[in-house]
């Protein structure tokens, strides 16, 4: 009977559906004689029939007018029902601001917020309706939308800004929905398009659309290096070097807004290919100028990249000019920069006195993120190893292993490095 009623409902024969549901409830008012399911969840036939009756009345389907009373009765009768939250989600239309008294609306939604504190949808229902209804409690709507963390879609942020604007607080509207927010949209769009293009180029399939989407990413964010490098790499791999240069060549450097890190990505791309070298070195020089003029942490990484790339390009003397003792002294309280510096020079077995001082300083600084500490100690071990102080290197690497293991990180990388140091010690003893 219930399934037949459902068929009538989906055929829009609501009167017949309502009649059958009422018959079913009359036959088994206690809901003990049969089970059904709703969205793959078991439920008694009677409970399901009462839910469908409430839903039909809620929208005036098979009833003379819309009425939420039956859904409210369902919620009261079945407080532990799997369908309770869904019943509430349909019932909210009767309590939107302006559709009943202000007091009734506030009472209903406050109860809903308390019952489902972690569900953003009910707060959004109230807040979004308050944007257009003059009788809404604006402060309550703002509190509701501010409790939605994080905002999963642009609709939520738009609603938040609309409420601030309605309140006359344009500074908060701009903070929520201004340039910082729009920049994040651009950034996420470019990232998604780039990942999409990269995936298909890597798998050598769907290449026409991958190319199209990477070009779109470049159009949206002309200074981003990653979509350009992926597309240029694809062109170069298929023998279209001219197209690679067109998308990621000297003209790219003409844009003064390119960040220092992106410039090093450009330089690295061509240095690895041993092509377009003059332009790559030019990019490194521009990157250096930008990075040295800014205290931004990312520019510290750009300097490390530039130092490595100058060495790869056969110009190691250029590195000491900007990435030597004078530079690191100006970053004496920045553990990540100290560690990168030490690791860089340890790998080149050069400037080791300065590298050791930097590594020792890095492990002495307080580190709020414990996951970073093993790398600090392994960098110190690398400097000791480069100097030839193998026993000290072993102790430092043991410290890296200890921190890593104690914090549930496994420490396999550091264990492997420790093994190599021990092998070097054993070899030297022979």
Image (cartoon, rainbow, N blue to C red):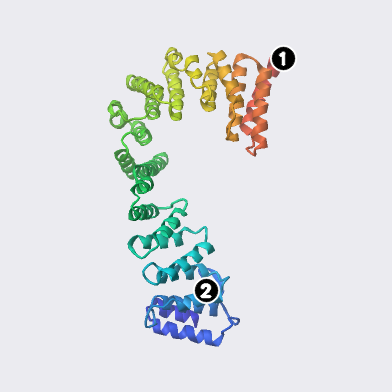
Number of residues whose C-alpha sits closer than 10 Å to that of mark 2, classed few (under 14), some (14–19) or many (20 or more): many
CB within 8 Å, label 1 to label 2: no
In the foreground, 366 or 108:
108
Number of residues whose C-alpha sits closer than 10 Å to that of mark 1, classed few (under 14), some (14–19) or many (20 or more): few
In the foreground, 193 or 70:
70
Q: CA distance from mark 1 to mark 2?
A: 80 Å
Residue 132 seen in this snapshot = yes
Q: Where is the C terminus found, in terms of image quarters? A: top right
Q: Residue at x 45, y 58 (%)?
A: 144
Question: Percent x, y for residue 416?
Answer: 64, 29
Left or right of 169? Residue 325 is right
> Is 156 rendered above or below residue 16?
above
In the foreground, 157 or 171:
171
Question: Percent x, y for residue 107?
Answer: 47, 68
Q: Which residue is mark 1?
A: 429
In the foreground, 143 or 316:
143
Which SS class for mark 2? helix
Q: Earlier in the sequence, mark 1 or mark 2?
A: 2
Question: Percent x, y for residue 16?
Answer: 41, 85
Q: Quadrant of residue 240?
A: top left
Which SS class for mark 1? helix
Foreground tag (1 vs 2): 2
Question: Percent x, y for residue 301?
Answer: 46, 27
Q: Which residue is mark 2?
A: 75
Residue 36 seen in this snapshot = no
Total numbered badges shown on the rendered structure: 2
Q: Quadrant of residue 97?
A: bottom left
Q: Identify the disc placed on residue 66.
A: none
């Amino acid at each position: 009977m219930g399934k037949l009623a459902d068929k009538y409902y989906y055929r829009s024969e609501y009167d017949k559906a309502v009649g059958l549901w009422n018959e079913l409830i009359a036959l088994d008012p206690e809901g003990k004689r049969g089970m059904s399911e709703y969205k793959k969840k078991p439920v008694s036939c009677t409970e399901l029939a009462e839910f469908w009756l409430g839903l039909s009345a809620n929208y005036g389907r098979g009833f003379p007018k819309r009425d939420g009373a039956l859904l409210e009765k369902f919620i009261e009768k079945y407080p532990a029902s799997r369908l309770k939250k869904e019943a509430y989600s349909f019932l909210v239309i009767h309590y939107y601001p302006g559709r009943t008294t202000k007091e009734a609306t506030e009472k209903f939604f406050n109860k809903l917020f308390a019952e489902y504190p972690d569900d953003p949808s009910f707060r959004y229902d109230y807040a979004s309706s308050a944007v257009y209804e003059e009788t809404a409690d604006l402060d309550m709507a703002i509190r509701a939308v501010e409790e939605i963390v994080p905002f999963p879609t642009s609709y939520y942020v738009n609603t938040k800004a609309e409420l601030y604007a309605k309140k006359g607080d344009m500074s908060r509207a701009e903070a929520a929905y201004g340039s910082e927010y729009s920049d994040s949209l651009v950034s996420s769009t470019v990232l998604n398009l780039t990942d999409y293009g990269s995936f298909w180029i890597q798998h050598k399939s769907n290449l026409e659309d991958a190319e199209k989407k990477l070009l779109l990413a470049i159009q949206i964010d002309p200074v981003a290096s990653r979509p350009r490098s992926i597309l240029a790499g694809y062109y170069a791999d298929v023998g279209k070097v001219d197209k690679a240069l067109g998308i990621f060549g000297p003209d790219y450097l003409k844009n003064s807004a390119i960040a220092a890190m992106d410039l090093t990505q450009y330089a690295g791309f061509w240095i690895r290919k041993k092509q377009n070298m003059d332009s790559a070195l030019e990019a490194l020089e521009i990157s250096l100028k930008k990075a040295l003029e800014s205290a931004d942490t990312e520019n510290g990484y750009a300097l490390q990249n530039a130092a490595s790339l100058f060495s790869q390009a056969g110009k190691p003397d250029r590195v000491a000019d900007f990435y030597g003792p004078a530079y690191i002294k100006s970053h004496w309280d920045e553990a990540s920069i100290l560690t990168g510096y030490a690791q860089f020079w340890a790998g080149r077995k050069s400037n080791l006195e300065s590298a050791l001082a930097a590594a020792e300083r890095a492990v002495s600084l307080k580190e709020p993120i414990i996951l970073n500490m093993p790398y600090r100690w392994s960098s110190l071990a690398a400097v000791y190893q480069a100097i030839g102080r193998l026993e000290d290197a072993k102790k430092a690497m043991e410290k890296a292993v200890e921190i890593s293991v104690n914090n549930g990180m496994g420490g396999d990388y550091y264990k492997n490095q420790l093994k190599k140091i021990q092998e070097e010690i054993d070899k030297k003893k022979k």
